[in-house]
Amino acid sequence: MSWKEYSLDQLGYVSRGKSRHRPRDAEHLYGGQYPFIQTGDVKHSNLYITKYSQTYSEAGLAQSKLWPAGTLCITIAANIADTAILAFDACFPDSIIGFIPDDKKADARFIKYLFDAMLQKKYKNFTQGAAQDNLSQAKLLSIKIPVPSIQEQKGIADVLSTYDDLIENNDRRIALLEESARLLFKEWFVYFRFPGHEHVKIIDGVPEGWEKISLGEITKLEYGKSLKADDRIPGTYPVYGSSGIVGTHEKALVKGPGIIVGRKGNVGSVYWSDTDFYPIDTVYYICSEDSSYYLYYALLNTQFINTDVAVPGLNRDFAHSRVIMLPSSNILSHFNDFIGPIREKISNLLKQNEFLSQTRDLLLPRLMKGEIQL
C-alpha cells in the first residue's frame, strides 16, 4: 500500500467558519431555519453531525457562511481537533475549520478517521503551552498527513463506517425508546392518566394518595470529584460530566445504578448510569439506594434554573427545593416495573454500541498504518 504525505489544503478546500457575534450579543441572528454547529456538537457526534442546539436566522446567515453537507468539521478551540461530518447544510463559527475534499484526492470519512487514529493527539500536543491551547489554521496546514490512493481511502472508510452506521442506527433506536418512556411518564404523572385514574379523586390538583414533596426530602445531591482528563486511566467505568459520558477510568467513585445531574456547564442535565461510574466535579450524583427509574424521569421533567450569577451553575440548596410529585406506592412500583423492560433494551443497545466502538477502534490504527490489506 503506497501512502504519500500532503497538507490538508492539498487534498481539498480548507477555511475557517464565520460568525461575528455570540447569542448574548446579537439575539436577532439566531432562531431561524439554518443549523448553527458549535464545537460541542462536533465533539458529541459520531461519524456524522445529525443534531444541533442552535440555529441562525436570515440575518445570521448573512454574516456567516452555509457549508454543504459532507463538509468535515474540525474544532480548533475548546476541544482541539475533534472531527465530524455535516449530514446537512449548516453554518459554524471560526472555532471550527471546514474541509471539503477534492473527490479525486480525498474521502471525508477517511480524513476523519485519520484524525481519530493519528492526528488528534499530534495536534493537541502541538497546541500545548499556548495561552488557550487553540489550533490555528496555519498550524493545521503545517503538518503533512499520510494518505493512500482515493480508492484505498474509500475501502478503509467503508470498513470503518460500517461500525459507525450500526452505532448510528442503535442511537436512533435508543432515542425512540427514551422518547416512549418520557411520554409514558408524562401520561401518568403530568396528565394523570395512569392505570385506574378514573377511580381516583383529584384533590387540590393532586390525585388522592399522592403528594408533592421537595427533592431534598427524598434524596441528597452529592458532589462529584475532580478527575482531570490527563489523570484518567482508560478502563471499564464511565466518567460523567455535565454533558454526559466524557471518558472512562479504571476505578469507579460511585456504585451504580445512579443518577447524575449537571452542576456546571450544562446545568440541570440528567443522566442514568446502569453501572458503577465516576462523576466529576461539574456534576452532582444520587446514590444507588435513592435512584429509581421514576426519579430519573421526574428529574428530566424538573425545571432547574441557573441560580449562581457570579459563577454559572446549579445551586444545591435550590435544586433540593425543587418540587417532585410522589405518587402512591402501588403506582410507583407499577411504573418502575413497566419502564424496566424499556431500560433493559436501552442498556443492551448501549452495550452493543460499546462493543462496536471498541472493535472499530482496534481496527482503526492498523488500517491507518496500512497493516491490514483490504
Image (tube, rainbow, N blue to C red):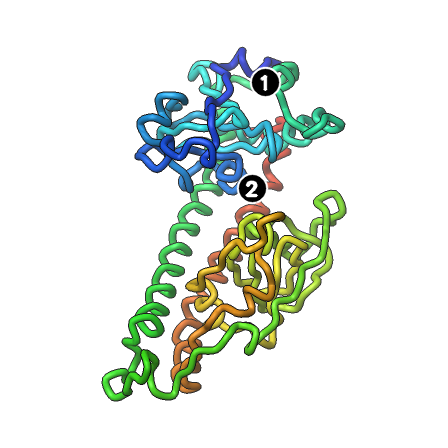
Identify the residue at image location x=59%, y=27%. 76
Of residue 300 and residue 70, the one placed in the foreground of this image is: 300
Residue 80, how many percent across, how many down?
62, 31
Q: Nearer the viewer, residue 238 or 345?
A: 238
Residue linked to disc 2: 360
On screen, residue 338 above or below 64: below
Q: Residue at x 59, y 47 (%)?
A: 358
Mark 2 surroundings within 10 Å by alpha-carbon count, few (fewer than 14), some (14 through 19), many (20 or more): some
Residue at the spot of label 1: 137
Relative to 143, is 90 on the left or the right?
Answer: left
Residue 288 is situated, as x and y percent measured from the top left of the image, at 60, 72
Q: What residue appears at the point 49 percent right and 68 percent down from the top-left corner?
A: 322
Place of residue 197 in the rendered image (x, y in percent of width and height, measured from the top left) = 27, 82
Which one is closest to the eye, mark 1 or mark 2? 1
Q: Residue at x 44, y 37 (%)?
A: 49
Residues 355 and 208: in front is: 208
Label 1 Cα crowd, 10 Å radius (few <14 / some 14-19 / many 20+)? some
The vertical placement of 19 against 51, above or below, is: above
Residue 60, visible in the rendered structure: yes
From this view, report whether residue 198 is shown above or below residue 273.
Answer: below
The numbered mark, 1 or 2, whose residue comes first in the sequence reads 1
